[in-house]
Amino acid sequence: MSKYPADIAERLDRTNELLQRMLMEVAKTPSTHAIFVDAGYVYAAAGLLVTGTEDRRTFDLDAEGLIEAFIDRARTIFADSRLLRVYWYDGARRRIHTTEQQAIAELPDVKVRLGNLNANNQQKGVDSLIRTDLESLARHRAISDAALIGGDEDLVSAVEAAQGYGARVHLWGIEAAEGRNQAEPLLWEVDSRRTFDLDFCRPYVTRRPVTTYEDDTPPPSREDVRFVGAQIATAWLAARGRESLVDLLPGHPYLPGSVDQDLLVEAERLLQHSLRGHAHLRRALRDGFWQHLQAQF
């Protein structure tokens, strides 16, 4: 005879039956994983490992092939799990997709998230996007495992947030040419670690051919070079907006290395003549660039 009144005993039986059904449904629900890729880290680490440089302009990355390789590796590691999607985090001026980023966004099972790029070509806001997605998916039990490909210490908070909701976070990295390319606090925080070596990365990174110009023609005049510098400044301002000048102007008369290199490469393309070895012409190029920008204030 039950020690509970009949109505309470009936309700307890019904509750136990519902709990058993829920447990059975949970047991039948497959695990789900997602892959979170910091594209800035991948370009820098893979470029340095395969070609010896982090400069994106000097090599091409087969993003489609690399993403498929990541998916295949995840399929092996998370054998009893299904893929939710791949999140690809990158930077762009005014968060407007480049042609390459548009192509990546059109791939199946891939979501492109864009942070901003400042005047020094540094990504801004990417880490916070990763944290938002990781935390949200873990909180809603949309994923049980997250493969995170990155190396920035700022990602530690994203890992902690996801783990707080019960998700396991696995850090994937690219072999460092020397030393480490992932922050130690990040390595300490994750649930597991894996590294992709040179043989894995080599098929997806190709060095671009170096553009050379014949130097048997007379070099351009200083005025021609100054004019081209102003031309490039006009395009630079149109692409980045006046707010980018706030980051650039305090460094006058010097330009950040990445901006200076872009200026030189574009000027040589327009002039069809190498400015290497012509220090006075490179100064004229910078003068024309700066003169146009300062005239906007």
Image (cartoon, rainbow, N blue to C red):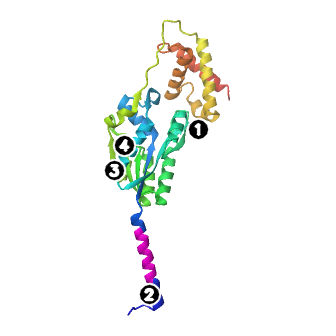
Marks 4 & 1, CB-CB < 8 Å contact: no
Q: CA distance from mark 2 to mark 4?
A: 56 Å
Name the mark on residue 77.
3
Mark 4 or mark 1, earlier in chain: 1
Q: Secondary structure at mark 3?
A: helix
| Residue on which disc 2 sits | 9
Of the two numbered discs 1 and 3 in the rendering, the one whose residue sits closer to the viewer: 3
The 10 Å Cα crowd at callout 1, few under 14, some 14 to 19, many 20 or more, is: few
Residue nearer the viewer, 255 or 145: 145
Residue 211 on the magenta segment:
no
Residue appearing at x 56%, y 37% in the figure? 97
Region of the chain picked out in magenta, as a range: 12-24
Mark 3 or mark 4, earlier in chain: 3
Mark 1 or mark 3, earlier in chain: 3
- The percent coordinates of residue 189 (x first, y second) are 37, 52
| Residue on which disc 1 sits | 96
